[in-house]
Image: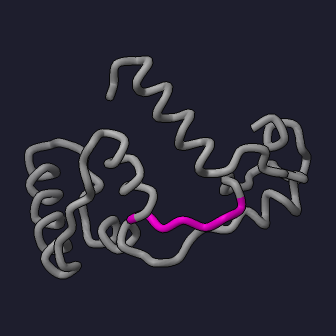
Amino acid sequence: MTLALTGDSASGQIFILGDGYGITCADYFGRLAAMAGGKVRSLPTPVAIALFTALGNAQRAIGQPSELNAATVRMLNRQGTYSIEKARRLLGYVPIIDLDEGMARTEAWARAEGLL
C-alpha cells in the first residue's frame, strides 16, 4: 500500500497484490469455508446464473443494491488467476508473506475476534 501511495508510477493505477502464486476463487473461498468448519457448495453455472440473476433483480426491484448477476457468477467461477507482475514492475513490489501464512494469520485473527 505504501508503494502504491508514494510511487509516481502508481497514480490512477489498479494493482493486484498477493504472494505471486495464483489461486482460483474456488480454492480461496474453500480455504475460508474450511476455517469456519464448512465447505463451499456449488451449482451448475447455468443454474447459478439464473438463480442469482433473479435474486439480484428482485433486490434491485425493492430498492436494495445488489451485485448478484451473471457477470458476478462468471467471475467467481473463472479458472484463471490474477498476476502481480504489474505491481512488481511499476512498484517494485515483493511479497513477504505467502498465501498459507496469510491464511493462517487471517484465521488466527478471526478466532481472536470471535468470528470463528
Where residue 3 sits, quadrant-wise, is: top right
Q: Quadrant of residue 64?
A: top left
Instruction: Give how far across and how far down residue 40 sits, in percent.
Output: 26, 58
**Which residue is depicted at the point 78% across and 49% down?**
95
Q: Is residue 96 magenta?
A: no
Q: Quadrant of the N terminus?
A: top right
Please say if 38 is above or below 56: above
Q: Is residue 71 left or right of residue 83?
A: left
Vertical placement of residue 20 versus 66, above or below: below
Above or below, 36 relative to 108:
below
Quarter of the image that includes the C terminus: top left
Q: Position of residue 9 (x, y in %)?
A: 88, 53
Q: Residue at x 11, y 58 (%)?
A: 55
Asked whether residue 34 is in view, the answer is: yes
Query: Farthest residue toward the top?
Result: 113
- Image label count: 0
Q: Main secondary structure of the magenta part?
A: loop
Q: Residue at x 30, y 69 (%)?
A: 73
Indicate the position of residue 8 as horizontal and vertical percent values. Answer: 91, 47
Q: In the picture provided, is 44 more to the left or to the right than 101?
A: left
Can I make out residue 14 in this image?
A: no
User: Relative to 17, does residue 115 appear above or below in the rendering?
Assistant: above
Classify residue 115 as left or right of residue 81: left
Report the residue at 80% width, 48% height from top: 11
Q: Position of residue 114 (x, y in %)?
A: 34, 19
The magenta stretch spans residue 23 = yes
Colour treatment of the image: one colour
Span highlighted in magenta in the image: 20-26
